[in-house]
Image: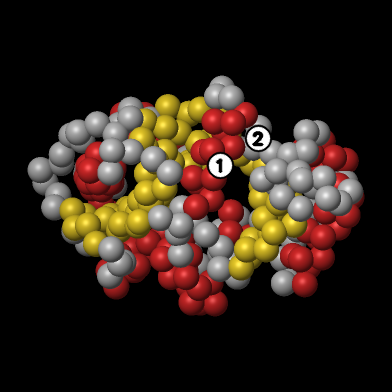
Amino acid sequence: MRSAADIAALDEVIAAAWRAPVDEPLDGWQLRYGHGLTGRANSAWARRHDGGMPLGDKIAGVEAFYRERGLRPKVQLSPASEPQGLDGELAGRGYERSADVLIEVAPAEAPVTEAAWEVDLTAEPDELWLEIWLESRRLSAAEQEHALDILRGSDGETVFARAGEVAVGRAVAHAGWVAIGSMATRPEARRRGAARAVLGALTGWACEHDAQLCLNVEVTNEPARALYRSAGFEPVYAYWYRTLPS
């Protein structure tokens, strides 16, 4: 596992790549609201503990923030979260733990290309890119309305990749890293190299930025993890959520 400082820096990169439209500070934490679209954009990021208010008051502030918006209170944690012992404190208050989400890293090296697929890189997602991505997310109509705000709202240069009419991905450059995400492939095109082509194109873009690569992937998503392993990614730590059931 990397040092707490290294983990905190990567936490920053992952957060910058997926900004919530509403982001309010709370004594070193960030209260994020993205209209219910994904856990990361709708959870409190326990970034650091400035010590300006008691922990119990901070947790109460989290709960009030999300209940006012019709969501269950949720906190994102990693080994760098502050204060120490926060995970245990939330567990004692009845917050349930999610499965791990792995942060994986790789050097940006010249990618192996997939000749069967031509990949377009654009600064904005076109209608087909959005169609493929939205199909994979199974979002409600209300959530779809807000998807573009988050996809376009990253803190760094962003690129959107699309392989034909079947696979997409996205990357954000920030602080010497390129964070890859929003990978999706239509079911009929899986195991045909389309996702690998998208990943290769985004890796090439990272090379142009002289940046290291990182991404987040659910520990249970073995097909995606197998793809990333084959491209040289290795897990370095995990983050997870604690959610109040009611």
**Mark 2 residue element:** loop
Q: Please give the name of the residue rendered at 58% of the width and 25% of the height, measured from the top-left corner.
A: 3
Quarter of image, res 124: bottom left
Looking at the image, which is closer to me, 207 or 94?
207
- Residue 149 appears left or right of 195: right
Dot 1 crowding, Cα within 10 Å, few <14, some 14–19, many 20+: many
Q: Amino acid at mark 2?
A: Ala
Image marks 2 and 1: residues in contact by CB distance under 8 Å? yes
Give the image location of residue 98, x and y in percent. Answer: 67, 43
- Marked residue nearer the N-terminal end (2 or 1): 1
Quarter of image, res 39: bottom right
Q: Please give the name of the residue rendered at 65% of the width and 35% of the height, measured from the top-left corner.
A: 80
> What colour scheme was applied to this rendering of the protein?
secondary structure
In the drawing, what numbered circle is on residue 11?
1
In the drawing, what numbered circle is on residue 80?
2
- Residue 147 appears left or right of 114: right
CA–CA distance between discs 2 and 1? 8 Å
Q: Is residue 5 above or below residue 153?
A: above
Dot 2 crowding, Cα within 10 Å, few <14, some 14–19, many 20+: many
Q: Is residue 167 visible?
A: yes
Q: Please give the name of the residue rendered at 30% of the width and 57% of the height, measured from the top-left corner.
A: 159
- Residue 49 appears left or right of 13: right
**Mark 1 residue element:** helix
Give the image location of residue 122, x and y in percent. Answer: 24, 62
Q: Amino acid at mark 1?
A: Asp
Quarter of image, res 182: bottom left
Q: Please give the name of the residue rendered at 54% of the width and 31% of the height, measured from the top-left corner.
A: 6
In the drawing, what numbered circle is on residue 154?
none
Q: Residue furthest left?
A: 115
